[in-house]
Amino acid sequence: MTPHTLTDHAHLKAHDPHDMIGAILGLPEQFEQAKRVALAADLGALKGKRFSSVVVAGLGGSAIGGDLLRAVFEPILKCPVVVVRDYGLPGFVGSETLVVASSNSGNTEETLSAYAQARKAGASILAATTGGKLDALAEADSVPSITLPVTGLQPRAAVGYSFVPLVVAFARIGLLPDAVLSDIDEAVTVLGTVRTECGPDVPVESNLAKGLANGWLGKIPFIYGSQAERGVVAYRWKTQISENAKALAVANVFPELNHNETVGWSGTHGQAEIEKQLTVTLLRDSTEPSHIVRRVELTKELLAERHVHIDEVWAKGKSALARMFSLVYVGDFASCYLALAYGEDPTPVAAIDWLKKQLAKV
C-alpha cells in the first residue's frame, strides 16, 4: 500500500463496510451520552458507603476504561483500584470492596465468574453493561447497574462507555472529587479538536494519524508512553493496532523500559536487519517531570544511533483526563487508517470469534 490510499475515499469506504471510522468519529458524542447515562443511574446504597478497595472486572474493551481511570486518577483516588482480566478475584475482596463488573455484551464469561465470586465474598457490586446475563443477574440481585446504550459498537470502539460512567460513578460515591465531571466536558472539546485534525477528510500531509499509519506500513510499531497513564495509552494503541489493523505492535512505558527493553536496542549480531522493520512512537506530555524528560531524550539518542525512525505525539488539553484521551483518540484514528492502508476491514475480529467458539465446545 502507498500513502495515496488514505486519500482515496472509495478505497476507504470499500475496506470499512462496518464503518469503524464512523464509530471513531462519534467518540465526543459518546462521552456526552455516557455522562448523562451515568448521572441518571440509580447507585442505591453505594452512595455514601466507604470502600477500602475497588476491583474493576472486565476483559478487552470493557476493561480498558478501568485501566485508564486507575492510571490517570491514581494520585487523587480515595482507595486503591485494581483491574482484573481473569475469572478470579484477589483474595482481599470482601465487604469493604467495590467490584465493578464491566461487560459491554453482558455475557463475558470471565466477568460473570468475577460477579459470582464478588457476591460470595460479600462485596458491593456495580454492574456496567448493555444487557445480557450480567444485566439479568444485577436486576435479580438488586445490584446497582449503569445500563449502557445498545449501539452495536465493538467494545473497543465504545471506550467512552467503558470509561466515563466509571468516572461519574466514582465521583457520585465519593471516590473522586466532583471536579472530574467538568474534566469530562473539557475532554469532549479536546476530542472535537483532534477529530477535526485527524478526520478522514484531512489530507495525509496535514493529518497526524494518517502520517503515523503510513510510517507503520510494513513495520512493527513500538509505542512508548512517557510515564504513568501514557503507559496505559500505549497499551491501548497496541491493542487497537492488533484488532483494527490485524497487525502486531509492542507497548511499554518509561521509566520501566529503561530497565530492560532499552537493552534490546543494543544488539550487535544480526540485530540491525531486524531493526529496519521497527519504528518507535513516543507518547508525550508537557507535564512530564524533568527526570522523565531526561530519560526520554537519552533513549531517543540511543534509538537515533540505530537509525530507528521516531515519531512523537503530544497530549492536548488542560486536565489530565483530557490530555490522556487526546492521545487515545489519535491512536484510534491511526490504527484504523493502518487497517485501511493494508486493505483490512477494521471491524471484525475473526481470531477472537474463532477462539470463543472453540472454547464453547468444551
Image (cartoon, grey):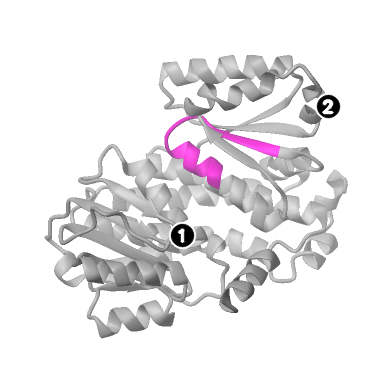
In which quadrant of the rendered view does residue 55 lie?
Answer: bottom left
Is residue 348 something one can see in this rendering?
A: no
Tell which of 119 and 191 is nearer to you.
119
Query: Which mark is first along the chain, 2 or 1?
Result: 1
Is residue 141 something one can see in this rendering?
A: yes
Which quadrant is home to the C terminus? bottom right
Residue 105 place in picture, x, y as percent:
48, 74
Residue drawn at the location 25% of the way across and 73% of the way down: 144
Picture layout, residue 103 above or below residue 299: below
Q: Looking at the picture, which amino acid does disc 1 mark?
A: Gly
Tell which of 2 and 88 is nearer to you.
88
Residue that mark 1 sits on: 160
Q: Looking at the picture, which amino acid does disc 2 mark?
A: Glu
Residue 319 located left or right of residue 356: left
Element assignment for label 1: helix
**In 3D space, how far apart are the residues under numbered discs 1 and 2 (Cα atoms)?**
40 Å
Residue 118 place in picture, x, y as percent:
27, 66
Q: Residues within 10 Å of mark 1 (few under 14, many from 20)?
A: many
Q: Nearer the viewer, mark 1 or mark 2?
A: 2
Residue drawn at the location 48% of the way across and 37% of the way down: 230
Picture layout, residue 223 above or below residue 41: above
Picture layout, residue 278 above or below residue 23: above
Residue 114 place in picture, x, y as percent:
35, 66
Q: Name, please, the residue furthest toward the front.
A: 362
In which quadrant of the rendered view does residue 205 lie?
Answer: top right
Q: Please report the bounds of the magenta region as a residue range.
A: 221-235
Residue 335 place in picture, x, y as percent:
67, 50
Numbered label attached to residue 273 = 2
Q: Is 232 part of what is drawn in magenta?
A: yes
Tell which of 6 and 86 is nearer to you.
86
